[in-house]
């Protein structure tokens, strides 16, 4: 069991001054599964991803990736090991065309190991590889979309660009921070198959999500956070029956009696 | 009626459209006319620069051209750092000073000729400047600017206080260039090489990484690249250009002293970048070729020189704040000609 665990998180704590953003959060993720993290606003989901990927230093705790300690390493080192992330607030390079956005991750040491110094090896230069990745993620190759400046792209494409940046690194794990938020229903409908395809490709996914229905379609297990603490963990249906989860999401029944 | 007929037979055509539609970034030109359209401005610049020593034969103006060349190197470095890496550097004076002193020391104490001291001073200067600026690299914007400004101020005071490296007298008797043609063409060729080299660099893959650092450094970290490393490489390039200018300066004045840490070297490149158009790389060059000779012309006005200079700067910044080169590029791309239908 533990041999298959690709990412193990032990007792992560993070305090911003007096605010305890995360308190003793532990979980472990199996290779190839889709793991959901849900919780009300401010429950520490994004902080957890920031801690795992090294964007903020955790106060205490340990993160093992394939059995190797990656706690508090620099974000670029962690990304180079194959643990990549998307940002909830998209961070494209607005002054570059969409496909040139991907040249930057393709320039990383991890991508260069397979692609060589000049780019994609036999696949062509980095621009060509970028277009291939973008097509895979839903940018139409023959349209103008991949060649447009990122600043002129709508949210849906920027969310895909976030995922594409991860894919350019040929990741083992992608931590998705709300890839469905801000999208229309039809955009989400076209995103879900992409997520399923990533899973089929053998990529382990950790998804923070507020769109529970779409999340439960893809996720095999979910974890619930509330006020920085882990409430419960398990298959989606069971978790949503949990009284504490209902309370966190909908407020206490007892409290509602008084209103 | 006649007018209608005329417009039916002829229409206006923009030359750049055909080129831009077919290619985005890569030029696949199909006619001599289009080749000329693309090559002409670049060729004009190169030929113009190479002809300058002939057009300005007096020794005084020769020296001005050399000084302009040094400012161009600084301005290119500033433009590159500010608009392609997102680091606003006020360290031009520091780069010049380090390069200048290194060349002078190598020449005086080791007796090396300028052909060796200039490349060595460029390399050593770039290494020294990059190492000293390493702690400041996590900073951005005005905070980085303040640290870079501190270095030239501090180092010149240290030299003065400790009376090292010749103290306030500086290092005298540095070797000069064999003749004025070598002096002129060396700097002009370096300038042309630096300009086109940097233009090439910012469009290469590594250049895109630099631009990514400016645009969104967190995304660069998430892409598995160390932003400190790439900022350091960029600072290395810019400080190398500055140190090259400094080494050259020491050799043309046959002297290296505290005035090489003067703030002119930090400020004029910025003014030139603003006037010429930031982010174009050619703009700062044009800006230097306007500003530095202009300040020489204005010497006739005596003390009023700085006032007139300041007024011209303010007028340009208020009415052409985008910069000469951005404006000229736009107009050139909008250039139309009549064609028969």
Image (cartoon, helix red, strand yellow):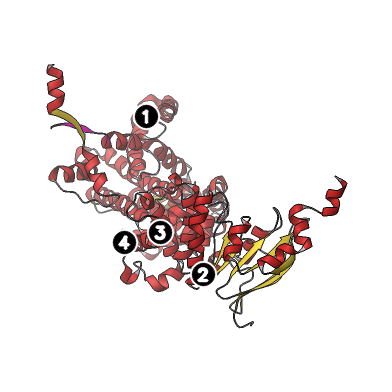
Residue B150 percent coordinates (x, y): 56, 48
- In three-dimensional space, the C-alpha distance between marks 1 and 3, rounded to whole angstroms, equals 59 Å
Disc assigned to residue A199 = 2
Describe the element under mark 2 as helix, strand or loop: helix
Circle 1 sits on which residue? B299
Describe the element under mark 4 as helix, strand or loop: loop
| Nearest the eye: B263 or A100 | A100
Say which quadrant the C terminus of chain B sits in. top left
> Do circles 2 and 1 both sit on a common chain?
no
Disc assigned to residue A156 = none
Instruction: Give the class, few, some or many, for how many residues have Cα within 10 Å of label 4's Cα (few <14, many ≥20).
Output: some
| Nearest the eye: B130 or A50 | A50
* Mark 4 or mark 1, earlier in chain: 4
Q: In the figure, A66 relative to B65: above or below? A: below
What subunit carries mark 1? B
Residue B188 percent coordinates (x, y): 27, 48
- In three-dimensional space, the C-alpha distance between marks 4 and 1, rounded to whole angstroms, equals 35 Å
Magenta stretch, main secondary structure class: strand
Describe the element under mark 1 as helix, strand or loop: helix
In the rendered image, which quarter is residue B40 located in?
top left
Circle 3 sits on which residue? A134
Residue B2 percent coordinates (x, y): 12, 17
* Mark 2 or mark 3, earlier in chain: 3
What subunit carries mark 4? B
Residue B325 percent coordinates (x, y): 33, 37
* Magenta span of residues: B334-339
Circle 4 sits on which residue? B113
Instruction: Give the class, few, some or many, for how many residues have Cα within 10 Å of label 1's Cα (few <14, many ≥20).
Output: few
**Nearer to us: label 2 or label 3:** 2
């Amino acid at each position: 069991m533990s041999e298959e665990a690709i990412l193990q998180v032990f007792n992560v704590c993070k305090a911003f001054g007096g605010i305890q953003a995360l308190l003793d959060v532990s979980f472990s993720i199996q290779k190839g599964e889709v793991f959901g993290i849900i919780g009300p606003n401010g429950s520490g989901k994004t902080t957890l991803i920031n801690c795992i990927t090294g964007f903020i230093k955790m106060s205490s705790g340990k993160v093992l990736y394939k059995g190797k300690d990656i706690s508090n390493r620099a974000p670029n080192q962690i990304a180079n090991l194959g643990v990549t992330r998307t940002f909830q607030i998209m961070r494209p390079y607005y002054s570059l065309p969409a496909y040139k956005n991907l040249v930057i991750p393709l320039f990383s040491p991890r991508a260069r190991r397979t692609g060589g110094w000049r780019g994609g090896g036999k696949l062509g230069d980095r621009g060509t590889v970028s277009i291939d990745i973008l097509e895979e993620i839903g940018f139409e190759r023959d349209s103008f979309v991949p060649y447009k400046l990122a600043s002129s792209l709508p949210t849906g494409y920027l969310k895909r660009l976030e995922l594409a940046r991860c894919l350019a690194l040929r990741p083992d794990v992608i931590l998705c921070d709300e890839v469905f938020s801000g999208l229309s229903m039809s955009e989400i409908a076209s995103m879900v198959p992409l997520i399923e395809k990533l899973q089929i490709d053998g990529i382990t996914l950790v998804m923070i999500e507020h769109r529970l229905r779409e999340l439960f379609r893809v996720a095999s297990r979910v974890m619930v956070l509330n006020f920085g603490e882990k409430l419960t963990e398990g298959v989606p249906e069971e978790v949503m029956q949990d009284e504490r989860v209902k309370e966190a999401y909908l407020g206490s029944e007892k409290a509602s009696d008084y209103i | 009626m006649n007018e209608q007929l005329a417009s039916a037979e002829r229409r206006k055509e923009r030359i750049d459209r055909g080129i831009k539609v077919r290619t985005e970034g890569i030029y696949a030109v199909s006619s001599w006319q289009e080749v000329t359209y693309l090559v002409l401005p670049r060729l004009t610049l190169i030929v113009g620069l190479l002809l300058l020593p002939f057009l300005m034969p007096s020794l005084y103006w020769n020296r001005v051209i050399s000084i302009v060349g040094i400012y161009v190197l600084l301005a290119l470095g500033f433009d590159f750092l500010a608009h392609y890496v997102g680091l606003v550097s006020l360290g031009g004076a520091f780069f010049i000073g380090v390069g200048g002193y290194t060349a002078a020391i190598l020449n005086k104490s080791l007796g090396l000729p300028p052909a060796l001291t200039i490349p060595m001073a460029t390399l050593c200067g770039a290494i020294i400047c990059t190492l000293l600026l390493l702690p400041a690299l996590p900073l951005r914007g005005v905070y980085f600017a303040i640290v870079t400004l501190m270095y030239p101020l501090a180092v010149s005071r240290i030299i003065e206080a400790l009376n090292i490296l010749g103290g306030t007298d500086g290092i005298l008797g540095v070797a000069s260039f064999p003749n004025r043609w070598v002096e002129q063409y060396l700097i002009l060729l370096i300038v042309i090489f630096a300009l086109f080299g940097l233009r090439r660099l910012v469009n290469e893959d590594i250049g895109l990484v630099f631009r990514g650092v400016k645009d969104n450094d967190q995304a660069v970290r998430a892409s598995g690249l160390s932003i400190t490393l790439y900022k350091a490489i960029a600072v290395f390039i810019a400080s190398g250009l500055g140190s090259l200018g400094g080494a050259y300066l020491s050799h043309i004045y046959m002297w290296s002293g505290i005035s090489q840490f003067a703030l002119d070297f930090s400020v004029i490149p910025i003014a030139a970048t603003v006037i010429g158009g930031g982010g174009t790389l050619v703009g700062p060059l044009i800006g230097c070729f306007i500003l530095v000779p202009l300040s020489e012309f204005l010497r006739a006005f005596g003390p009023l020189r700085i006032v007139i200079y300041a007024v011209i700067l303010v007028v340009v910044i208020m009415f052409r704040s985008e910069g000469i080169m951005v404006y000229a590029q736009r107009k050139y791309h909008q250039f139309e000609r009549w064609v028969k239908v």
